[in-house]
Amino acid sequence: MNVTVPFEGIGASVRRKEDLRFLTGRGQYTDDLNRPGQLHAWILRSPHAHARLGRIGTAAAAAMPGVLAVYTGQDLAAAGLGGLPCGWQVTGKGGKVMAEPLHPVLATGKVRHVGDPVALVVAETRAQARDAAEAIEVDYAPLPAIATIGAATAPGAPALHDEAPDNICFDWEIGDAAATDAAFARAHKVVRFDTTNNRLVPNAMEPRAALGEYDPNSGEHTLWTTSQNPHVIRLLMGAFVLKVPEHKLRVVALDVGGGFGSKIYHYAEEALVTWSAAQLKRPVKWTAERSESFVSDAHGRDHVTHAELALDQEGRFLGLRVATLANMGAYLSTFAPAVPTYLSATLLAGVYTTPVIHGQVKAVFTSTVPVDAYRGAGRPETTYLLERLVDVAAREMGMDRTEIRRKNFIRPDQFPYQTPVALQYDSGDYEATLRIALDAADFAGFEARRAEARARGKLRGIGISTYLEACGIAPSKLVGQLGARAGLYEVANIRVHPTGSISVFTGTHSHGQGHETTFAQLVTERLGVPFDQVEIVHGDTGKIPFGMGTYGSRSLAVGGAAMVKAMDKIIAKGKKIAAHLMEAAVEDIEFSDGQFRVAGTDRSKAFAEISMAAYVPHDYPIDEIEPGLEETAFYDPKNFTFPGGCHICEVEIDPDTGEVAVVNFTACDDVGRVINPMIVEGQIQGGLAQGIGQALIEHTVYDRDGQLLSASFNDYAMPRAKDLPSFQVSTSATLCTHNPLGVKGCGEVGAIGSPPAVMNAVVDALRDYGVTHVEMPATPVKIWSIIHQGRSGADLPAAAE
Amino acid sequence: MYDFEYHKPSSVADAVKLLAADPEAKAISGGMTLLPALKHRLNKPTYVVDLSGIAELRGVRKEGDNIVIGALTKHYEIATHPQILAAIPALARMAATIGDTQVRNRGTIGGSLANNDPAADYPAAALALGATIVTDRRSIPADDFFLGMFTTALEPDELVTGISFPIPEKAGYAKLRNPASRYSMTGVFVAKGPSGVRVGVNGAAPCAFRQGEMETALTANWSPDAVAGIKQSPDELNSDIHGSAEYRANLVAVMAKRAVADAG
């Protein structure tokens, strides 16, 4: 019998299941949820960047209409609450462990950034809570702000934390300093480069929200929160802050409207609503205002870096030296110490065969919002550094920008490739993605377009970035040695129901990625079950055994691999049942297209017949195996995955206004095997939009007093459709060699590869002005000043002061 | 927002009475500025007087050589109104660039003029076209109306009821948007009308202003090249994280040139 069914397995651009509810306004986000008897929280936040906290007068606020409670840091300390924990411990030079000052849920002693939570008000309505917060009297004794890395590391700078008198959290290094020095000693040329990777505010479309509830009968706490990883929140908040065991704490992340990293971390508000709900025996809800998001969601990037590249006469890279100052903000957020170190400095080889590398990272406390992983997390910073540096080197060597890259590429026959900075790349073909992108972008025909633009009075430039990144951070043993306080495996529980429909419980979480579709395609492909018979369940510690969540493009590479492992257990058990039913040897049972067949015969049993037999075990090998068909697998990867590729950007600059328009953008990315091409293209386009945003307009500006000047969308520029060209996106795969799907990850490549492509194009467009570097973002005023005032861009004031 | 009393009068007289009764009362038209301020608790009015129910504030009509636009006319209506498109197409084109679709369908010309945001579009057009702002009690020439940042010649209880624009021979507008807010970083409106050549500038300074040198140059020679060489002084221009005073001074010249080209 031949039945034509639409192909919905691996490689099909199946429409996203979840979009129906998202696009019709039926998504269920945390703020959509309301519980009976619910109260509302308002958080009083510090208006000062750095101040000593004196008396906090709460009596007037507590007496206001509708107010049930006002809590301060002292109340939480008295109740025995712990500080917000950091998930990584970096050990620096000489075995010195990082400074890890207490990060209190509500400030105690001092406030350390504008937005630092000072008091919690819980009232019947949100407006009442807010009214009462305004009645709280706080005695602040302002201290000097430490608003930038420069201010924090200046001689005599005031200390933010007693534990770090010089504001240095850690001073860490990687690679062989002596061997690198030796390489520089015999260099034909040394190219030097300084840059600041601009600080970004994540700005997920959905603001953070948290709703806590306590059941006095069971003693169970429930937290609904906007999280990328509910199990991690349960662990961090339960074990370290509230001291509630896992079986009495359920954390649920419903639909989440974007995260980009900012919803990985455990935040004070989660602990506040969970704890106060138990105190007051009523649910407590908090939802961020957009202005609160700006001063309380962990920011991204903010690295200041000096780099030196040694080259031989032919332009081969002999050695690389990099020293970075990384802004941690006021406190250590969950992942923060790992970002400039293990997610950044370990990528310093890039796609090149640089034989020796030495990287140093000093992490710095400042009186600003904590800084943590943001789409790409460390990898965009390193990629930007390397790909700008390579362009600067090409210019200084008088070499073509493609030639210098090709000369130094790791060749396909060199994999697995051991870098001098710890990582071993398993696969890649950088020449292939470069060639495809050059052709698609008509790189060869660019000079004609430049000339045509010049005739119109526009400055046109083209820029290339050839990059790689590391996803699915792992294995657990390695990350444990590096200082991770958790494992980095993933979990899948696959429950086959009697009729053969399937529920998949995954420890990853979707905040826009389309997991409900992509993961269902995996199951359809492997178990031969129709797509509409597969349900993906995520985001509830009450349903899912465990999980580490979604970040670092890990969901498919790690979570998908766990699903494959669990499905293989299902198939193995199914074969035993099928062998029994068809009176054949297990070894003779083959499984494909949803059919268990006896090899070499026409005898077969459909998947649903086997699942029914498992649950109605009348005729069943009950002595050998248990009834039921449900399997769980934990998958701990053998290595990172290494996506990479080539991005080519073409810009036109209006010299009269300094405006930079991205007129063409071409990307050819190697993300390994592609499960759903439409979703992958969407992920890459979204990443490109963020990368172009960082390169051209996004900029977080603190003034000297530590006030955030870019604290709303009036002053913080987000990329819009009008700022973006119609992208030319393609993929060219080499498969990951160590996971069962051959997948690498696609969520971050767009944001990682694109900023240097844009900036290389900007510098190229300005080449007639003698410009060798432009710092991000390339705003109109900056470009105009470079053209008309001969300024380098680096010397422009970051803020009006 | 804080609590306030909400009133929705149906006549200008009633609205003015309410505003006169309490100095802390606020009139609301489209609410594109007042509503965000209320939500941020930056404003604590006693009464909010909603003008949307006042029919006499609506409508666009041609009166002799003037286009008279009711204060409650929305940006979208100005952008698409056949009489405005025929008589002062530059004004319609300008209205089409304000904010986004939602803003253009809420925000009103009367509200924008009375608010006098330095980065709003209309003040430059009112100055360049030599408009007259009509209130419940008098007519105020645009030259006397815009006094400073968010400051106008209006009395606290005085309501803009309409704006009268003399129909120009030609007019044009060009602006550079602030990359973040998309308000005008600097915009220039040029017009050649019954009272001669006039050039209005927005976004560059704390208040919209007329550029006299450019008016003289364009009177002698109406062409983009006539203004291209004129240097606007950066003194007293705005300087912020988006643009220095020098940059805005440059934009005055660049946008003036483009506005003349736009006017044809």
Image (cartoon, rainbow, N blue to C red):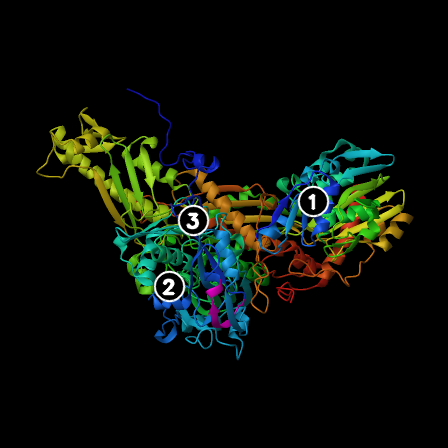
Amino acid on which disc 3 is placed: Asp
* Mark 3 or mark 2: whose residue is earlier in sequence: 2
Residue toward you, B236 or B56: B56
**Picture quadrant of residue A439:** top right
Residues shaded magenta: A48-60
Q: Quadrant of the C terminus of chain A?
A: bottom right
Amino acid on which disc 1 is placed: Glu
Q: How far across and how far down the image is residue A655, in percent?
A: 71, 53
| Mark 1, residue position | A452
| Residue A684 in the figure: left or right of residue B261 | left
Res A103 visible: no
| Mark 2, residue position | A86
**In the image, is residue A659 part of the stretch drawn in magenta?**
no
Real-space CA distance between mark 3 and mark 1, rounded to the nearest whole angstrom: 34 Å
Amino acid on which disc 2 is placed: Cys
Residue toward you, B108 or A363: B108
| Mark 3, residue position | A429
SS at circle 2: loop
